[in-house]
Every structure is written in structure tokens, then in C-alpha cells.
Image: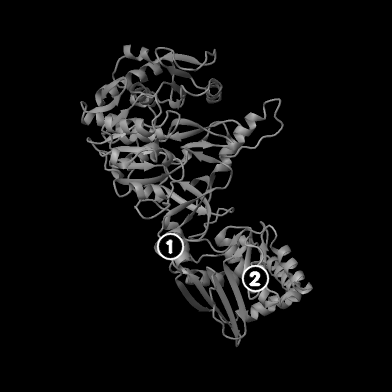
């Protein structure tokens, strides 16, 4: 190797040191599934008259080359679409690297481009590609840019996106070519027109942060916002327990709950819930009071839950299998008025002078007449509190309202076609909000809830036997649990919903040809579920779908500005499903529950990274923080690390998932 070759190699290595392994536009997963081979698609657009003069004026004032400014606009286009801070773009034999921060402007990028071009000129005889001959770990760019005075054709050359600008007679022409097999049909026109829009805006205000430059036109913005609007349906102004009361009045002798502790008709369930409500009211429970329930998964638990609702209380489930210190924290933090316990005292809630224990069997002696309607919860009142993992080292209570639960149950009934012949399995532990999804999926639709014993854990052959033995038709499982059973072993199952963790590509191929398979998504803060997708056998990793009725979705950047389809962004959820907030955590509530996103509505910032695909559904990409979903468990590694660091022998701790 000559000295010039060695110097060129060292130059390129320094430029791309620690660069992302692959740089380019976001790839459309749905398009890849349809078109596995390259499909070039091109689009040509002429820039508005006078833009060349404005480009020259800005370049002269700033002492920059027009090429550097034009490339800066292209870099802005890719940064905004890919939602990355560091990327590479190929241009002729060179590679340009751009790194952006919160205040980076078009001029900042252009100055860096000129500096990089000047530094690369001595090495023009030895292009960047020489690194590929030596090291297959060299970062790869999948976007290219060219600019010249003679007509030019954008050529993919193994890239996903190529753009060429031609300047002639005071006119600029943009030619854009994309691999539609990776970016989707219509991407060439979208990228070309958005480039022009960014360039025009950047020339008008070159010192403005690129993150704030307009990217979408009015029609695109309207179409984008429409993707996130769920169907508007009437929402009854009644609390959630009235759904069960309606079923008890309509068909009182139908079996509501088939549990290991007995069978309950809708009338029996409703009357027992009335007794629990009267007991609670007699003990001083008033609307808005938190009532903890420490009962194993059972029919009695369902009656207790409904009784808390009827009394106007806020239901707080305490899983008897939780460690005592966790339960004690939840009771203390929630300021629960009292805790309903099992008759045999088998729960693990410790005695405390601050919390009254109330054996639920005392309700059996109460009158079963309905409580006064004014004593019950209003539709806008909080219904339940679920404690989730917290990054600060302690769990946080999420306060969820009746309106969200009614909206959910109403959609479940209609979407899954539930009725008298349907049987829903109670799979989720009581501490999970998914348990309320299952309870109201059944009881809000006149179906039967099948409640197996708390032990043994439901997985593999035990789960199969439970589904078959209970004549279960509808079940909701984490994908990792669904993978432990086989479709042929559960012939009576008609609907499988997977949720709680990302659905792997193999699962739709196994299940979707045999029954109705749904991939559901939703944080606790959005009343269990915010989106759903009906899976097909050949689609690979399924998207998470679109919004439930009456909900609204936005995919936004860090400034809460909607990002274009295909671009990664944070998912925000609005509508009746949005929780009231975090119990006694006003600062955290203000951070995550916001008013904005271009409207006066209230939204929950999920912290989940998603994007709209070309067919108008959301794809889940991961987390913006370190939160982990494992077998449906929502885990904050920082909470575990904080607990470890309380040990005197631990100075620092890091938690990862193996």
C-alpha cells in the first residue's frame, strides 16, 4: 500500500469511527413482505423559479458552496425520517457524516459538509470504498446524493434512496429513485417533494433548527392525523359495573362465572356484588376511596371487584403471591381505606394499625338489594389502580377511569363477536390490568368467564387442558406463553389475542390459518389496550394495528410534532382510555400526561417507539428508555438496580435481560 493509499484509508477511518453500522431511510416492513426483490421507482420534480438565486445568495453570504447547502437539506430529510442523530451519506467517491443536536441548523450542517469535502479532496484518488476491501465491519450507507450542472440520473447502486440535483438555466431539478421493495410504493415522490419543502424553508431561515422546519404539506398532515383517529361510537355515560347489571337483568340465569370455587349466574354474581358494596358502605367507604382486594383468582374476586365499583370505591388488586414488602408498599402508598381479604386468612398482607382488614365473607350476611345509585361511581370517576414498575426504584399507581373500561368492553363485545356461547379464560394474574380485560370481555358481553385455580401456572400441557376442559373460545396470552401450546390441541378455541410483549414472526404462521389471531398493544395508562391488528399467516412480524374506537393516536418527535409515515417516533394516545394519572405523583403525571400535540386534548406519552407503515398501521420498534416487557411483565431495570444498591455490599448495579 502506498503512502497516499494509507493516508486515504486513515482519513476515511477517522471520519466513520463509531458511526452507526447502517445509515439510510427507514425500511417499510410491510413493503418488504410484499416485494422481496429490488423495485426501482423514480420521480422528477422541478424546483420553483428563483430557488437557484436564493440558494446562490445564501451560499455567498455564508461563504459556502451550493453543494454543501443542498446536501444539508438532504441530510435534514433523512434525519427527520430516520429519527437518528448520526448518519452517513454517499456522494460520488466520498462519504459525508452528519451529527445533529437539538439546535442544529441547515447552516451548521452545510458548514460541516464543506469542511469534510475540503478534508477529503487530497484523497480523491482513493474513494471511501477502499475500506470495504479491508474490513467488512465498515459502516454502510444506503442513501446517496449527487449535484451537477449537466443532466444527471439518480442511480441506486445498492442504496435504498438516491437523489440527484441538476442546475441549468437558473433552474434546479430533483430526481429521486427509491427501492420501492424496501421503502414502499410512492416513496420516491414523497421524498422528492418533502426535500423541496425542506430546502425552501431552510433557505428562508437557515439558522432555524432543522427539527422545526416544515416537512409535510397540509394534505399530508390531514391524512396523517386521520390514520390515528378511531371510529367514533356512542359511549354510555355509566360506570363499568352497569354492564354486568344489564346482563343480570337481561338473562339472570345464564352462567357468568365458572370458577374453581363455584359457578355463579349473572343474578347471583350481581347480588353478591351488591352485598359487598353494602358491606363497604357500612364500613365507611365513600366515592373515590381506594379499596384493596387481596384474594386469589376466583369467582369471589370478581364479585368483590364489582362490589367495590358499586360502592363507588377504587379497586386495588393485591396479588397474594407478591412479596410482603411489595404489598405493604402498595397499601401504604395508596392510602387504602381497607383491604378485603380471604376468609381463611391465607393472604400475605401483614397486619397494620393503618389498614383495616375486612373478611369478604361478612358480605354474605348483607342485604342483596342494589346500593343507592348516587353512591356508585360516575362514568368519569376512577375505577381501579394498578401498580406498575417504576424507574425511580419504587412502583407507581396508575389510576384508570370507568369511561375507558366501558369503551374497552363495548369494543370487545363488537370486535370479537362475543355472546352467550363464548367462554373467556381468566389467565392473567389479578395484579395485571389484563385481568380486567378478561373479566369485562366476558361479563360485558353476556359470555362466561372461566376461572381456573391460581396454581399450577398456566403454560404448556396445563394450559391446553384448561382451555379444553373449560370449553374456552377466547384467550389472551403473552406470545411466549402462546408458543407453548399447539393449535391442533385446542380445537374449540376460536380467538387468540397475544399481548404484553412483541409478537415474533413465527407465531402468525402457526396460528392465523387455524383461528382468529390478534396482536394487541396498550400500556396500563391507556386502559389495557389502545391498538389491535388481525394477523395473517404469511405476514411475518405483525404490526400492532390501528386505534380502538373513540381513541386517537399520534406518532411524534421530541417536540410533539407528528412525524411522516415510515418515520420512527413516540406514540401518544388520546381519548377516553387515557388514565387519570399516577397516584400522588404530580410531577411524573405532568411529564407523561400532556396537553398538546396540536390540540387541547389530553394525551399519554407512551415512551414506545413506533411508526406508521404504508398500509396505515403501526409497527412497534422498541422503547425510548430501558423498560423491558417479559412474558407480559412490565419491568423497569432501574427499579431492580435501585433495590440492589440498597444492599451495603453493592456500590453500583446494572440490569439487563438475558
Q: Secondary structure at mark 2?
A: helix
| 171, above or below 635, in the image | below
Asked whether residue 34 appears in the rendered view, the answer is: yes
| 545, above or below 413, in the image | below
Q: Secondary structure at mark 1?
A: helix
Tag 2 or tag 1, which sits nearer the N-term?
A: 1
In front of the other: label 1 or label 2? 2
Quadrant containing the C terminus is: top right
As drawn, the label of residue 31 is 1
x and y percent of residue 323 in the render? Answer: 53, 22
Extreme residue toward the bottom, this view:
169
Asked whether residue 371 appears in the rendered view, the answer is: no
Q: Residue at x 34, y 30 (%)?
A: 241
Q: Residue at x 45, y 29 (%)?
A: 431
| 515, above or below 447, in the image | below
Q: Which residue is mark 2?
A: 129
Q: Nearer the viewer, residue 496 or 292?
A: 496
x and y percent of residue 196 in the render? Answer: 56, 73
Extreme residue toward the front, this view:
1
Q: Quadrant of residue 118?
A: bottom right
Q: Nearer the viewer, residue 339 or 149?
A: 149
x and y percent of residue 86 in the render? Answer: 64, 59
x and y percent of residue 167 in the render? Answer: 60, 83
Total of numbered circles in the picture?
2
Residues at marks 1 and 2, CA–CA distance in whole angstroms: 29 Å
Q: Nearer the viewer, residue 508 or 117?
A: 508
| 137, above or below 522, in the image | below
Binning the other alpha carbons within 10 Å of mark 2 as few (below 14), some (14 to 19) or many (20 upward) gives some
Q: Residue at x 45, y 26 (%)?
A: 317
Amino acid at each position: 500500500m502506498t503512502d497516499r493509499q494509507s493516508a486515504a484509508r486513515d482519513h476515511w477511518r477517522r471520519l466513520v469511527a463509531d458511526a452507526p453500522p447502517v445509515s439510510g431511510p427507514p425500511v417499510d416492513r410491510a413493503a418488504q413482505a410484499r416485494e422481496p426483490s429490488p423495485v426501482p421507482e423514480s420521480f422528477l420534480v422541478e424546483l420553483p423559479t428563483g430557488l437557484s438565486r436564493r440558494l446562490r445568495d445564501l451560499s455567498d453570504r455564508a461563504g459556502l458552496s451550493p453543494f454543501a447547502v443542498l446536501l444539508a437539506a438532504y441530510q435534514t430529510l433523512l434525519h427527520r425520517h430516520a429519527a437518528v442523530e448520526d448518519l452517513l451519506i454517499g456522494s460520488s467517491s466520498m462519504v459525508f457524516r452528519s451529527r445533529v443536536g437539538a439546535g442544529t441548523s441547515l447552516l451548521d450542517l452545510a458548514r460541516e459538509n464543506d469542511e469534510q469535502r475540503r478534508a477529503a479532496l487530497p484523497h480523491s484518488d482513493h474513494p471511501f470504498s477502499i475500506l470495504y476491501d479491508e474490513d467488512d465491519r465498515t459502516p454502510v450507507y444506503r442513501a446517496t446524493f449527487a449535484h451537477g450542472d449537466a443532466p444527471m440520473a439518480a442511480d441506486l447502486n445498492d442504496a435504498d434512496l438516491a437523489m440527484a440535483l441538476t442546475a441549468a438555466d437558473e433552474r434546479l431539478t430533483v430526481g429521486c429513485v427509491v427501492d420501492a421493495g424496501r421503502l414502499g410504493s410512492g416513496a420516491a415522490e414523497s421524498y422528492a417533494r418533502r426535500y423541496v419543502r425542506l430546502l425552501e424553508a431552510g433557505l428562508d431561515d437557515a439558522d432555524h433548527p432543522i427539527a422545526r422546519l416544515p416537512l409535510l404539506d397540509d394534505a399530508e398532515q390531514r391524512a396523517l392525523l386521520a390514520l390515528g383517529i378511531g371510529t367514533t361510537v356512542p359511549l354510555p355515560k355509566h360506570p363499568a359495573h352497569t354492564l354486568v347489571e344489564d346482563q343480570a337483568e337481561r338473562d339472570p340465569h345464564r352462567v357468568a362465572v365458572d370458577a374453581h370455587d363455584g359457578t355463579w349466574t349473572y343474578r347471583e354474581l350481581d347480588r353478591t356484588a351488591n352485598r359487598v358494596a353494602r358491606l363497604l358502605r357500612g364500613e365507611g367507604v365513600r366515592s373515590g376511596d381506594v379499596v384493596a382486594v387481596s384474594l386469589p383468582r376466583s369467582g369471589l374476586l370478581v364479585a368483590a371487584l364489582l362490589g367495590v365499583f358499586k360502592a363507588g370505591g377504587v379497586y386495588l388488586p393485591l396479588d397474594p403471591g407478591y412479596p410482603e414488602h411489595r404489598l405493604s408498599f402498595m397499601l401504604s402508598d395508596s392510602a387504602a381505606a381497607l383491604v378485603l381479604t380471604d376468609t381463611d386468612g391465607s393472604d400475605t398482607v401483614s397486619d397494620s394499625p393503618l389498614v383495616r382488614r375486612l373478611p369478604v365473607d361478612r358480605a354474605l350476611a348483607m342485604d342483596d338489594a342494589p346500593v343507592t345509585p348516587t353512591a356508585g361511581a360516575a362514568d368519569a370517576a376512577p375505577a381501579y389502580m394498578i401498580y406498575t414498575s417504576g424507574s425511580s426504584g419504587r412502583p407507581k399507581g396508575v389510576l384508570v377511569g370507568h369511561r375507558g373500561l366501558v369503551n374497552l368492553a363495548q369494543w370487545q363485545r363488537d370486535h370479537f363477536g362475543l355472546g352467550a356461547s363464548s367462554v373467556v379464560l381468566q389467565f392473567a394474574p389479578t395484579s395485571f390490568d389484563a385481568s380486567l380485560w378478561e373479566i369485562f370481555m366476558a361479563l360485558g358481553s353476556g359470555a362466561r368467564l372461566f376461572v381456573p385455580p391460581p396454581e399450577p401456572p398456566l403454560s404448556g400441557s396445563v394450559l391446553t387442558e384448561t382451555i379444553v376442559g373449560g370449553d374456552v373460545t377466547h384467550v389472551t396470552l403473552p406470545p411466549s406463553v402462546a408458543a407453548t401450546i399447539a393449535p391442533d390441541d385446542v380445537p374449540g378455541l376460536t380467538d387468540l389475542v397475544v399481548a404484553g410483549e412483541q409478537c415474533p414472526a413465527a407465531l402468525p404462521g402457526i396460528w392465523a390459518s387455524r383461528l382468529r389471531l390478534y396482536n394487541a398493544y396498550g400500556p396500563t395508562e391507556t386502559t389495557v389496550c389502545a391498538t389491535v391488528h388481525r394477523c395473517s399467516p404469511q405476514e411475518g412480524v405483525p404490526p400492532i394495528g390501528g386505534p380502538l374506537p373513540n381513541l386517537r393516536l399520534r406518532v411524534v418527535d421530541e417536540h410533539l410534532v407528528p412525524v411522516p409515515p415510515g418515520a420512527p417516533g413516540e406514540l401518544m394516545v388520546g381519548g377516553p382510555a387515557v388514565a387519570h394519572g399516577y397516584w400522588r405523583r404530580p410531577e411524573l403525571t405532568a411529564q407523561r400526561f400532556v396537553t398538546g400535540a396540536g390540540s387541547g386534548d389530553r394525551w399519554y406519552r407512551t415512551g414506545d417507539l413506533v411508526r406508521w407503515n404504508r398500509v396505515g398501521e403501526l409497527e412497534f420498534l422498541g422503547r425510548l428508555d430501558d423498560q423491558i416487557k417479559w412474558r407480559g411483565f412490565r419491568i423497569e431495570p432501574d427499579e431492580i438496580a435501585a433495590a440492589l444498591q440498597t444492599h451495603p455490599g453493592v456500590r453500583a448495579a446494572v440490569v439487563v435481560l438475558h
